[in-house]
Amino acid sequence: MERFDRFRELPKNVRLHVWLYAASVPRVVSVFEMHTVKGRPNADAMFETVMISRTRPPAIISVCHESRSTALQIYKAMDEDVRTKGTQFDAPIYVNPKVDIVLRGKRACREGDAFRHRRGEWIRESKPCASTRTLAVDLLAVTGRRDDPITSRLRKDYNTRDDGAIFSDEFIDLLSVTTIQQIAACAVNGMEDLIIVFGNDDDASKVTLVPLNPNKYQWTPREKGALRVVAQLRKDLLDHWRDPGNGPLFTTSPPNISVMTVQMVPTPSFPQFQKLPIELQDMVWTHALQHPQIITAINRKDDKAYIGTTRQPSLLSVCRASRQLYIKQASHNLPGQYGVYYTSAVDTVLLNIIPGYNFKAYAKYELRSIGIPASISTPLSASEVRAFHGLREIVILIGGRQGDCQIQLVDFEQQATSPCDSSSRDCSSFAQSPFIYANSLRKDLERHSKVWNAVQQSKKKGKASIEWVMPTVRVARMVPISETASPYMYQHRPCD
């Protein structure tokens, strides 16, 4: 980074121009809501919604007192009336209303929050997402389901509230609001430009938005499909503006709608692949099948097995041959709202075990590999593991997911370098804790395995029987494989 040590010697008005210029650079601020109590009838919290952003705050807010004072006159906290004061979510989300872009990714769109902020009793209280002049939403916002799963559950919950607070009228109004009406509400409240974002398969929050390739002959089928959706959206929005019944509502023109994608990390290509013999191509696809995916299980209130929305493997969308080969090898029997392809030979199902949760609901699906977070408060016991028939591997996982990125499991023991000195107390305790957990589980499994096999042999009266095979236990780190280029991926020059 370039340094200018004599900056403080500049006249104050010159320094002010520098701060103003820094604040004029547009930022992409990714925002999503976490609905803490999900509208359950027995959980009336003061704040049911927490607004979260993974985007870094503006740099000039933390440079010096002068820059911060200037920045606070420009940047506004978009979550001021939602922020839960005095908690870990008290950090404000600053945006420059004139130049910044608020990004609503796949997570916000799945929850039905693409064009609105819901807060408090969020079945009733919401406002248009118009904190800035420009709003960017994932393509899922205009192509996904209207009646999202959480809203469907709220329909049932709010009709059976114990306190009699039934909001039937408001609820009907909420569901009847169409996507076009939500966009119109944002426009009335100050939104001027709407960007439809496609290609953010990682659901990354730190992105750089770039326009499409100007050469339409090089557009992919996904790009052509996105443009068709946007063309229809423009038409429907214009018809809504021209509707005589809506005339008094609008004093401005409809928002400008554009299509953009995210800047991707350059990857090597092999254009001659399609000229290879079919046998070699199939060998490549077969090798790619050995890359495991991490499938996350959701803790449901009814203790039923349920798999969350999982990014589909890339082989399903490369070409017809790769798709057919993957479908032939994978099964489709895991429970969930959306179909989840699962290859038992390589895939790992992540079980977020919490106290009192009946994770044995997943035992009947013949899982070969399960992942257990190293940070869980309730360790897994050998008696619980025995419920999984055919289990071959237990992976103690370090780290977590980042959006919808694909995950690579890297054995923790094989890492040659460490981010901190091994003699450091903090580093040592962090590194040893997962291994202590894994060793304890191995010993517990070995001890119970001998007893179970002896009992099995006695029941068969000496006849040969299939012994219970003890699964292996290993420690691995979850390493996200991000295909999206982050604006914070600086190129550092070597020191002089």
Image (cartoon, rainbow, N blue to C red):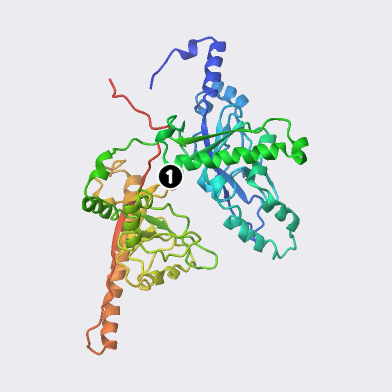
Q: Residue furthest front?
A: 217
Identified at 43% across, 59% down, the residue is 340
Above or below: residue 29 compared with residue 24: below
Residue 462: image quadrant is bottom left
Residue designated by label 1: 202
Q: Position of residue 370 (x, y in %)?
A: 36, 62
Residue type at mark 1 is Asp
Secondary structure beneath disc 1? loop
- 226 left or right, relative to 82: left
Identified at 44% across, 45% down, the residue is 201
Q: Position of residue 460 (x, y in %)?
A: 27, 88
- 438 left or right, relative to 188: left
Quadrant including the N terminus: top left
Q: Residue furthest bottom?
A: 461
Residue 186: tell me if it is visible: no
Identified at 29% across, 38% down, the residue is 269
Residue 127: image quadrant is top right
Residue 428: tell me if it is visible: yes
Label 1 CA crowd tier, 10 Å (few <14, some 14–19, many 20+): some
Q: Position of residue 13 (x, y in %)?
A: 57, 11
